[in-house]
Structure formats: structure tokens, C-alpha cells
Amino acid sequence: MQPEYLPFPALLCSVLSISRQHYEVTLDPGRALLSWRKLRPRSVKGRTRAGICLTRVLHRARGLAKSFSRQITSGSVTVPLTEIVSVEEAEIDGKYCNSMKWQHMCKPHAFTVRYIKRMKKHRWRCGEVTFWCSEEQMCCHWLQALNDALNQQTHRPKHLLVYINPYGGCKKGKQIYEKKVAPLFSAAGIAADVVVTEYANHARDNLYDVNLEKYDGIVCVGGDGMFSEVLHGLIGRVQKDSHIDHNNPSACLSRCSIRIGIVPAGSTDCVCYATVGINDPVTSALHIILGDCQPLDVCSIHHKKNFLKYSVSLLGYGFYGDVLKGSENNRWLGPARYDFSGFKTFLTHHWYEGTVSFQPAKWVIGSPRDNKPCTSGCHVCRQSSKQLQELQKEQNCRFEHSEEEWTTIKGKFMAINAVSLSCACPRSPKGLSPAAHLADGSADLILVRKCSRLNFLRHLIRHTSKKDQFEFPFVEVYRVKNFQFTPKHFEEYDTESTDIGNVSKKNFAQICTDHPSCVCSHVNSSWNCDGETLDQTAIEMRVHCRLIHLFARGIEDAPLTDDSNPSKILPME
Ligand SMILES: CCCCCCCCCCCCC/C=C/[C@@H](O)[C@H](CO)NC(=O)CCCCCCCCCCCCCCC
Ligand SMILES: Nc1ncnc2c1ncn2[C@@H]1O[C@H](COP(=O)(O)OP(=O)(O)OP(=O)(O)O)[C@@H](O)[C@H]1O
Ligand SMILES: [Ca+2]
């Protein structure tokens, strides 16, 4: 049984100075809060004649804790211990040492606390406050207590493996890491082994050899393509270690427990944006330092019994496949290559014929048009994944192979998009499917049927506003656990050959040479899989619920402060 008053964790409360003003500073380990409140001169006098130091270890935890819950007064700041980035002895600069106030001290004693400040649009910055103590002993006491509290947060990474793509996005990956991220990691006491990649797939291949046990996380500095490399390396490595054959489309893949952090330095940065709420390197670094953890669904893509790729953002055929293809020769344009190619692809206005079959994700409690986006600590994800787990247990693993309820749609499509997260990115802040969930075990399958150029434009424009992009008769959206696609012309030329895709391509090439004026080259599109083109057009996709974990927390509901008043952090009540 718990005694009424425990000696530990005890409150630590002192009068310390910040910028020569007196504050009552309290560390409440029970509620995991650090707070400081400005004292009026009268109350300081009442506490200590010197007006600087008074340390009281308070055991009346309950009464005081209650009073903290009401502490939303002006001049009062409360920071959860989970949001403290670092604590260290302050470096005293000349300004303070030479001031009259401190001249009597040969060595002023101060410590600096860095903590999360929430700015607009999910951007985080590092706030900094230096507390001055009158005695060395008090300073040590505070440093010790704060560091003890931080050390108790065992989910924070201590050792990271960092891969930097120096050529992603605007080619600033290395600079971004060195200037913005590395200093924060080192302040937080995180050791990092850095690999600057020398060729495409360097990071992926390296992850097969590296001793993963040494690390608490892997960080990739780059765009979605770089993240995809790390994802393939990690998932591939874990399956290899667990002797799971990834070529088997119905294999139950082993989950990867080591977390991946994304420092955005790419062209789209969709995975980062959709899991953090912004593509900002400092914000991402801070999420990594705090040791955030966000599970993420991953889709596997197969052609017959051959594994092709994993996808976490967009698996798109038609419009987005063509945009990607068209952008490849214009890499020199950097991120603008997608807009240029998007414009050209829009003007060419192609549609493609084929058959889509899918099985709905029956366990999910949400739907693609319920207007309930995935947020930090998402209830829909938690509940849905729990129900999926129960279903899998009930059906004793046969669930994955069940043949029930396939829906088949044959038609002409402008675009077929499957997304297992919203795909929010700077181009489209709500994404391709605004209510898709990060970790519910499902993907949203969006079918845009053949329509006029004007209608397609109306649909595209909706991605940039708050209006529903699915509210058109030519757009359908389904929440699925898997789907298959066969292009019409693949069916026609299908043979018993083992390399069907190549046979099909060969036949088309033949037809096009025979009829130079025809549009055969546009009979098939290609798949854009997280920014990479797939070699096959006939594919099957399956969602693996929560296969990986990121250093992220999903998108927080509402920022607690704004830029105009960043110093006031309200308690997390
Ligand atoms: C009129 C404006 C309409 C704007 C509509 C914007 C919709 C943007 C939706 C973006 C969805 C991104 C999904 C993420 C995919 C990533 O895994 C992948 C790798 O990074 N990125 C891309 O494939 C890169 C895909 C980039 C796609 C850019 C598409 C740009 C379309 C421009 C159409 C212009 C029509 C103008 C007519 C006058
Ligand atoms: N050293 C390297 N040299 C050439 N290519 C590399 C190197 N390192 C990584 N790559 C490849 O570069 C590709 C693109 O990188 P990245 O995703 O970082 O930028 P991006 O394509 O501009 O951004 P996004 O994917 O967000 O659109 C990745 O597919 C990755 O495999
Ligand atoms: Ca999902």
C-alpha cells in the first residue's frame, strides 16, 4: 500500500533568478513538470533576506501539486519534463560577469534548460532559460535533480545512426544536418554515427550489414526517396534476420522496433509532413531528441510471387505515375521538376484502362470521408488496430488469406492512388486523402475515372483547399486492406510466360512501330511508388499494420502557443 506522503519523488522549490528577476522555480517529479513563477519584490523579501536563495524540499506534495494545476497566471511558465531538450551548466558570458550585480561572486552558478516551444503550424523551436543560483551547491542540486528526471525517460535515444543524402531536394542535406541538427543532438547528449551516402541505395545496403544493436534509432536526412531507402534496408534486414520470405505476398512480416527519424531535405517530404505536421529540420530533430514514437502502416507490393517494393506514402498509377516519369529527366530542376511535369501531364490528359479489385478493411472505425483526420495519439488508429489484432487472433492467421468480399471495378481511370497516410505535403497541406490514418492497418484507394480536363482540374484544385476532393461523380474512395490492379492490355497480351511484364512490353513496342501515329505508348501508365517508378504495371498491394515506428507523434490537435507569445507555455492539463 502507498504511504500517504512519499519522501520521493519530492518537490524541489527554490527562488532563483532569470535575467536578474526573482522566480519561484519548482521541479515536481510526481507530475513531471518544471515551472517558474515571477515573484513580486514583497514576496521575495518574505522568503529570504538575501533575496536569492532558498531551497525547500517539500514533502507536502499533494497540496502543492493541486496549486500547480491552477497556475496559468501571467509570468508563469510550466514545461513538462518530457519536453525538456537538455539541461547543462550555463556558460557565463562577459556581459553577466562584468555587471555590478554579479561582481561580488567569483564564479556565478547557473544552469540552462532548453525546452520545446510550440510555434505556428506545428513548428517547434528550442526555448532556452538560464537560472542563476547564489551557491554552487544549489546549482549542483538542481542540475542533478533535472538530469535524474531526464535520465528516467528511457525512451530517449542515446546513440543514432544517421544517413545523409547530399543530393536530395535542393542538395542541402549535409548543410542542414551540420548547422541545424547536429548541434541539438550534441546538446541533448546524443552520439551520432554519420554516413554521407555516396550512391543511390548506399543506405539501404549498409543497413543489411550494420550492427543495429548499437543504435537506438536511424535517422535519414533527405526526402521521401531517402526515407524509402532506409525503410527498405530496415524492413529487409529484419525479415532476413527472422527468416521471412518477402517474396511471399501473404507473409506475416516481422515488425521493426528500432525507430526511424526523418530530417526533411527533399522535394516533397510527404512522410515527414504527414507524421509531424511540417517539413522542418529543427522540429524533426526535436521530436527525435524527445524520443517520440509513432507506429506506421507499410504497404508491400508484389507482382505475382515477386516482391517489388514497400510503400508508405503514395502508390499512384496514371496521373502521378506519369508526373514522376516526366520529372525524371528534369532532376536538375530540383523540387520544381514535379510542378513542371505536373503541368505537362495535366495538358496531355491521359486515361488508362484496367481492373481494380480490393478487399475492404472491415475492422476500421473510420472512413475516408468522415472528416476525422489522424491526430497525435489517434483514437481511430488505436481502436482499429486493436480490432484488427482481435480479428487476426480469432481467425487464426487465415484472415490474411481470406477470399471473401473482393470488389472488382473495371474501367477507364485518370488516376488510381493508394495511400496509407494522408500524403499531406507543402503542395497539398491536407493531402491526397485527408482522413487517412497513420496506423490503422488500412490504405485509402482513390479511383479517379475518366473525366474532362476541366473536371480533373477541379478535382486537383480541391487538394489545395479545405473542400472535399472526393465530392465528384467521377471520384471514388475506399478504405482497403489490399488491392490488385491489372491493366487492360496486360490481360490481352497475358501469356504463360514467367516474365509476363516483359512480354507485354515487347508486344506494345511492336504495335507502336507498326502504327507510328497511334497512341499505344500511352496504353499503360506506370506506378509511382513513393517517388520511384515500378517496373511492373500488374501489381498487388497489401497493408501491414504498424510495421515500422518513427520518431514522431502524429499531428497535434492545436498548438498551445503562437509566435506572438512564444514564452508562455501552458500546462498540459
Ligand atoms: C492547380 C494546382 C493543383 C495542385 C494539385 C497538387 C496536388 C499535389 C498532391 C501531392 C501529393 C504528393 C504525394 C506524395 C508523393 C511522394 O511519395 C513522392 C515522392 O516524394 N512525390 C511525388 O511523387 C511528387 C508528386 C508531385 C505532384 C505534383 C502535381 C502537380 C500538379 C500540377 C497540375 C497543374 C495544372 C495546372 C493547370 C492550369
Ligand atoms: N549519394 C547519392 N547519390 C545519388 N543518389 C542518391 C544518393 N543518396 C541517395 N540517393 C537517392 O536519391 C533519391 C532521391 O533522394 P531524396 O528522396 O532525398 O530527394 P528528392 O527525390 O529530391 O525528394 P522527395 O523524395 O521528397 O521527392 C533517393 O531515391 C535515393 O535513393
Ligand atoms: Ca493507414
Image: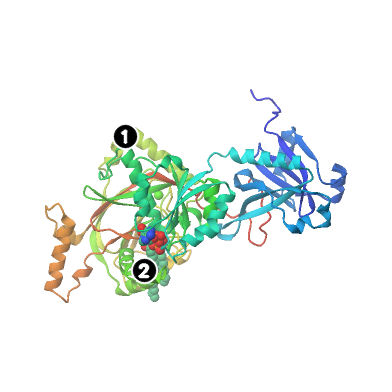
Q: Is residue 238 left or right of residue 175?
A: left
Q: Are marks 1 and 2 in contact (CB under 8 Å)?
A: no
Task: Name the quarter where the C terminus is drawn.
Answer: top right
Q: Which mark is residue 156?
A: none
Image quarter of residue 68? top right
Viewer-side residue, 290 vs 187: 187
Residue depicted at x 42% and y 62%: 268
Q: Is residue 191 left or right of residue 489?
A: right
Q: Earlier in the sequence, mark 1 or mark 2?
A: 2
* Residue farthest front in this picture: 106
User: Residue type at mark 2?
Assistant: Arg
The residue indicated by pointer 1 is 395
Residue depicted at x 67% and y 59%: 565
Q: Is residue 193 left or right of residue 230?
A: right
Q: CA distance from mark 1 to mark 2?
A: 48 Å
Viewer-side residue, 532 vs 64: 532
The local secondary structure at tag 1 comes to loop
Q: Is residue 530 at all visible to an observer of this figure?
A: no
Q: Position of residue 162 (x, y in %)?
A: 45, 51
The residue indicated by pointer 2 is 331
User: Residue type at mark 1?
Assistant: Gln
Confirm if mark 2 falls within 8 A of ligand 2. yes
The local secondary structure at tag 2 comes to helix
